[in-house]
Image (cartoon, rainbow, N blue to C red):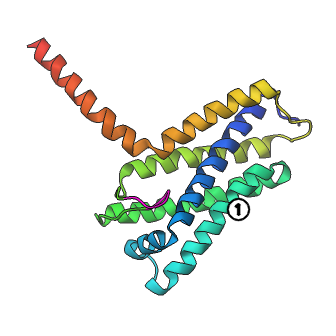
Amino acid sequence: MILEPLDLYALLFCRVVIGLVFGLSAIGKMIDLVSFERAITAFGLLPEQWSRGAAWVFLAGELGTAALMLAGSNLLIWGFGMGLALLLIFSGALVLVLVRRQVIACHCFGPSRRTVSIHDLVRNGGLILCCCGGLGLLWAGSLQNATPTLADGILTGIMAVTLAALLINVADIVLVVRPVARQRHQQHAQEQQ
């Protein structure tokens, strides 16, 4: 079965989102890998002596996922699969941190003071959906003659970059939007009185 045009664009969309997010995450970690090692230790899921090795394994996995998304073709299934596995591991660790009520900086995208929050799980949920969508599209169809037009590819890429930016910054967006929404709600309540 050959992918229909809409499936082709959906696959390209998922591919760009996952490749971009994992690529940016890996670059951020390379800037200060020691901070990521410290975050792994602070999560308390592995012995401290394993933190450096785990940091390198996660960095290699993120670089590999981004590279497989870039390479495309028959390697996409491996890229989406690796991305999904990493996201499930990351999400499990984030859930444990939240359940334990630990206040830890994640360093998901490099050095940061922002602590782990539910918004990190929302971001990962969106990325997990992209990985599952990509895997589903690959299992449902074939990549024979699967090349979008340049204009359609650019538009799909712009949409994917937009979603990636939103997902990466979801916690910051909520911090900005929540006070504005609360203020509007209070104004509306006062007007009703």
Seen as rendered, the residue at the extreme bottom is 49
Q: Residue at 64% of width from left, 31% of height from top?
A: 158
**Quadrant in which the N terminus appears:** top right
Q: Which residue is mark 1?
A: 64
Question: In terms of image quadrants, where is residue 115?
Answer: bottom left
Q: Residue at 85% of width from left, 34% of height from top?
A: 147
Seen as rendered, the residue at the extreme left is 193
The picture places residue 50, in percent across and down from the top left corner, at: 51, 83
Question: What secondary structure is found at the residue carrying circle 1?
Answer: helix
Disc 1 crowd, CA 10 A, few/some/many (<14, 14-19, 20+): many
In this view of the protein, which residue sits in the foreground, 39 or 130?
39
Horizontal side of residue 92 vs 62, given as left or right: left
Question: In terms of image quadrants, where is residue 26?
Answer: bottom right
Q: Is residue 88 visible?
A: yes
Horizontal side of residue 47 vs 162, given as left or right: left
Q: How many marks?
A: 1
In this view of the protein, which residue sits in the foreground, 138 or 186?
186
Q: Residue at 34% of width from left, 60% of height from top?
A: 98
Q: Residue at 48% of width from left, 59% of height from top?
A: 108
Question: In terms of image quadrants, where is residue 164?
Answer: top right
Residue 93 to residue 10: above or below? below
- Which kind of residue does numbered mark 1 sit on? Gly
Q: Is residue 6 visible?
A: no
Asked whether residue 6 is drawn in magenta, I would say no
Q: Which residues are magenta?
A: 107-112
The picture places residue 11, in percent across and down from the top left corner, at: 73, 39
Seen as rendered, the residue at the extreme top is 192
Seen as rendered, the residue at the extreme right is 145
